[in-house]
Image: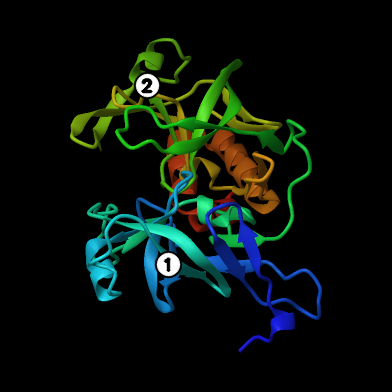
């Protein structure tokens, strides 16, 4: 049990949330590091609810609190709660007391053998620097704030309502540059998607080929075709340049959206106090990607190698080792 001198008790805003975490000899506490599961459609993190668990939860990239599926709420004797209630949310060694929560019948895109029991948004971590380190598959929660926006690694973001939703939910939006033009892009850091655009933009963007149908997409009770193509130019995020990114188009996509898979080689840090976000690229993965592009040029077979790299970087390393260059 932690003594009083070894605890941080901090009231967060007006919601009455209390943060409880270990400190070290009076110094600022070390970052809390928790594994992420990036193997499915959504980013998953293990959490504890009222000391029970851990349970796999969807880490939602919107400014929302905690939602539990009805079965878990019943297991925790919360099933009779009417309207919002509060829980103690545990993430690694961090505990947040008094976090607003609610029940939901949402399926959370469940996968066989790995069933998320709810979702947690960005809002419970508003007093922390929240980093999604995608290359190392880690969630990092730290004290402090980011430096001011420099339009290099650190960008300002705004909070905007998600379009086409009955529920009023805010999401972070940043400015990027797509094929030389400025564009507002909402960040969906908890969904394993890439760059999603309204289908109408497929007619005006320089694409490497015509968009091909690759499946369907469903939003609430609406369903539409999903198309994919590679941009024939670049996407710029601050000073970072993503060459010829893959883009998904659908009539159900109302605003440009960047998902977690677009940031495979990045650690993305949210500072909710100052409304800034940092995109820091992994140098090792960037070097590997550049080397794979060099092999593509030599092999004159860019599609296969690009897909191999995106699917399995270890295979690309083997290709580089076996390459005569």
The correct choice, above or below, for 26 with respect to 307 in the image is below
Is 184 positioned to the left or the right of 38 in the image?
Answer: right
Is 161 positioned to the left or the right of 322 in the image?
Answer: left
Is 209 positioned to the left or the right of 104 in the image?
Answer: right
Q: Are marks 2 and 1 in contact (CB under 8 Å)?
A: no
* Tag of residue 198: 2
Under tag 1, what secondary structure? strand
- On the image, the x and y values in percent for residue 152 come to 74, 34
* Tag of residue 87: 1
State how far apart marks 2 and 1 are (Cα). Answer: 38 Å
Q: Quadrant of residue 127?
A: bottom right
Label 1 packing within 10 angstroms: few (<14), some (14-19), many (20+): some
The correct choice, above or below, for 301 with respect to 112 in the image is above
Q: Residue furthest bottom?
A: 1
**What residue is at 30 percent from the left and 74 percent from the top?**
76
- On the image, the x and y values in percent for residue 157 come to 61, 33
Label 2 packing within 10 angstroms: few (<14), some (14-19), many (20+): some
């Amino acid at each position: 049990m932690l003594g009083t001198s070894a605890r941080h008790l901090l009231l967060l805003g007006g919601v009455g949330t209390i943060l409880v975490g270990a400190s070290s000899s009076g110094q600022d506490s070390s970052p809390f590091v928790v594994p992420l599961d990036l193997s499915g459609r959504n980013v998953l993190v293990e959490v504890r609810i009222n000391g029970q668990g851990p349970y796999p939860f969807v880490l939602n990239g919107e400014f929302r609190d905690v939602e539990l599926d009805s079965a878990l709420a019943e297991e925790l004797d919360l099933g009779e709660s009417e309207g919002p209630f509060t829980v103690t949310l545990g993430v690694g060694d961090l505990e947040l007391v008094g976090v607003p929560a609610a029940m939901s019948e949402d399926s959370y895109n469940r996968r066989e053998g790995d069933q998320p029991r709810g979702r947690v948004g960005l809002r419970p971590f508003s007093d922390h620097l929240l980093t999604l380190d995608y290359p190392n598959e880690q969630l990092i929660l730290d004290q402090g704030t980011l430096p001011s926006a420099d339009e290099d690694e650190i960008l300002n973001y705004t909070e905007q309502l998600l379009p086409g939703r009955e529920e009023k939910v805010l999401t972070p939006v940043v400015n990027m540059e797509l094929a030389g033009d400025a564009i507002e892009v909402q960040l969906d850091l908890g969904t394993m998607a890439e760059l999603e655009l309204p289908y109408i933009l497929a007619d005006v963007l320089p694409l490497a080929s015509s968009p091909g149908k690759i499946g369907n997409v469903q939003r609430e009770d609406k369903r539409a075709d999903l198309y994919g193509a590679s941009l024939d130019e670049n996407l710029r995020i601050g000073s970072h340049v993503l060459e010829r990114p893959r883009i998904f188009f659908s009539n159900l996509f109302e605003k440009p959206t960047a998902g977690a898979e677009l940031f495979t080689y990045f650690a993305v840090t949210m500072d909710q106090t100052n409304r800034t976000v940092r995109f820091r690229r992994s140098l090792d993965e960037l070097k590997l990607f550049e080397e794979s592009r060099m092999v593509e040029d030599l092999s004159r077979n860019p599609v296969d190698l690009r897909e191999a790299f995106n699917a399995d970087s270890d295979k690309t390393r083997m290709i580089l080792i076996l390459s005569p260059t």
